[in-house]
Amino acid sequence: MEPGSVTPFALINDVERRVTPVLDAWMMEQDLLNYHPLRNDMTTTIRAADFRTFLAATGHRPEVVAL
């Protein structure tokens, strides 16, 4: 990845599940979320519910906290 392309979609590469995603509670209350799709020159929109589905599909259980 190029510098600056940090994205929660990179969790798909964490096949050993060594990363625990920590997500902001306010953010997860929003209907739509915007993230880089593994590169920093684009942005993609995903519904929060679908993002939770993505996390579950990758085997990651996020911690949702008020930041």
Image (tube, rainbow, N blue to C red):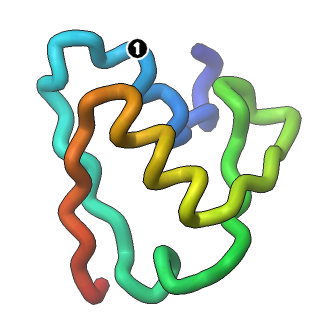
Residue 55 position, x and y percent, is 39, 41
Quadrant holding the C terminus: bottom left
On screen, 27 above or below 4?
below
The total of numbered circles placed on residues is 1
Residue 46 position, x and y percent, is 72, 54
Q: Can you tell which quarter of the image residue 58 is in?
A: top left
Q: Nearer the viewer, residue 2 or 62?
A: 62
Count residues near mark 1 (Cα–Cα under 10 Å), then give few for <14, some for 14-19, many for 20+: few
Task: Name the residue at 61% across, 82% down.
Answer: 30
* Amino acid at pointer 1: Asn
Q: Can you tell which quarter of the image residue 60 is in?
A: top left
Q: Relative to 30, is 46 on the left or the right?
A: right
Residue sitting at the far right: 42
Task: Name the residue at 17% across, 23% down.
Answer: 17
Q: Secondary structure at mark 1?
A: helix
Q: Relative to 18, is 58 on the left or the right?
A: right
Residue 41 position, x and y percent, is 86, 34
Residue named by callout 1: 13
Q: Relative to 7, is 33 on the left or the right?
A: right
Residue 18 position, x and y percent, is 13, 25
